Amino acid sequence: MRTYRALFDAHVERWSNGLPAGDLHAPMAYLLALPAKRVRPVLTLMACELFGGDPRTALDQALAIELFHNFTLMHDDIMDAAPLRRGQPTVHARWNVNTAILSGDAMLVMAYTALGPDPNVLAVFNRHALEVCAGQQLDMDFEQRDDVGLSEYKEMIRMKTAVLLAAALRIGAIRAGAGEADQERIAGFGEGVGLAFQLRDDLLDAFGDPAVTGKEQGGDLRNGKKTWLLIRGLEVEREHGSSVLREQLAMDASERDVATMITALRELGVEQEAQAEVERLAGTALDQLHLIDPNGDRTAALRALAVSLIERAA
């Protein structure tokens, strides 16, 4: 992981240093310089090497994935009116909304420039990039609805989060010349990890230690955000004839008792059910690696990275 990360970070630094001066490009360099895990581009390089390619030949494609991801963050922050990103002012807060919109648009164009002319790579990128946008729209739609089901939520996080991991891995495999079957398997691994990652994120929001996560405990619950936990909790409440969560959601967000909501989720068995779902999704994802490499030697690093993302405490 560290080797791939160092390789990619050096590539990003060269790219950022070559940007023209001015407020169109400065936000790009600023956002890319903020602390980040770089999971998606690292996965592109790892997949390329897994299937016999030189990861250096996939650096531009990894950059394209990271540029697209940051383009979505720049625009998401505007939609959410978020003042901070990774502990620092968001682009629209540091500059202004119009500059953030234009810089994000330009970042998307530059992602395509970095992606290269391979029609197979372009087709994968286009399909999954559109899904990411559709997932974001669904997430916003859910804010206005009280009847969101678990299957709808899973499809939303699949598109908003998981498919970009799948795209990163598939593009790395394409650069290495992997066959269609292996491309499907590595993409399936990425999608499964992405789903488990997001559900783990839901768990950490409600049950994580704020001293470790660095976030308010139960922030999503206080805001009534449609997460796996809240959706399932409301379902179980209806089955049991209880109403703690519904009573809390009927209040103004500032008046909700998050501790009461967390206790209710625990007593309903939702925490344990969610953890079991994380483990199921992770197992399904890791099964795809076994199909690629039954001995597990070539996929050990990918397996370790997946486990670290799914079992993280923050």
Image (cartoon, helix red, strand yellow):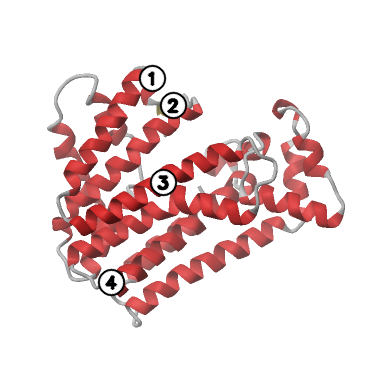
Q: Earlier in the sequence, mark 1 or mark 4?
A: 1
- Where residue 127 appears, as percent x and y from the top left, is 34, 52
Q: At numbered mark 2, what does the secondary structure look like: helix, strand or loop? A: helix
- Where residue 183 appears, as percent x and y from the top left, is 30, 68
Residue occupying image coordinates x 22% and y 63%: 174
Q: Quadrant of residue 260?
A: top right
Q: Earlier in the sequence, mark 2 or mark 3?
A: 2
Q: Is residue 171 left or right of residue 54?
A: right
Q: Earlier in the sequence, mark 3 or mark 4?
A: 3
- Closer to viewer: mark 3 or mark 1: 3
- Closer to viewer: mark 2 or mark 4: 4
Q: At numbered mark 1, what does the secondary structure look like: helix, strand or loop? A: helix
According to the picture, the residue beneath numbered tag 1 turns out to be 97
Give the amino acid type for the residue marked by disc 2 in the picture: Ile
Q: Is residue 2 visible?
A: no
Q: Earlier in the sequence, mark 2 or mark 4?
A: 2
According to the picture, the residue beneath numbered tag 2 turns out to be 78
Dot 2 and dot 3 residues touching (CB under 8 Å): no
**Which mark is on residue 57?**
none
According to the picture, the residue beneath numbered tag 3 turns out to be 132
Give the amino acid type for the residue marked by disc 4 in the picture: Glu
Q: Residues within 10 Å of mark 3 (few under 14, many from 20)?
A: many
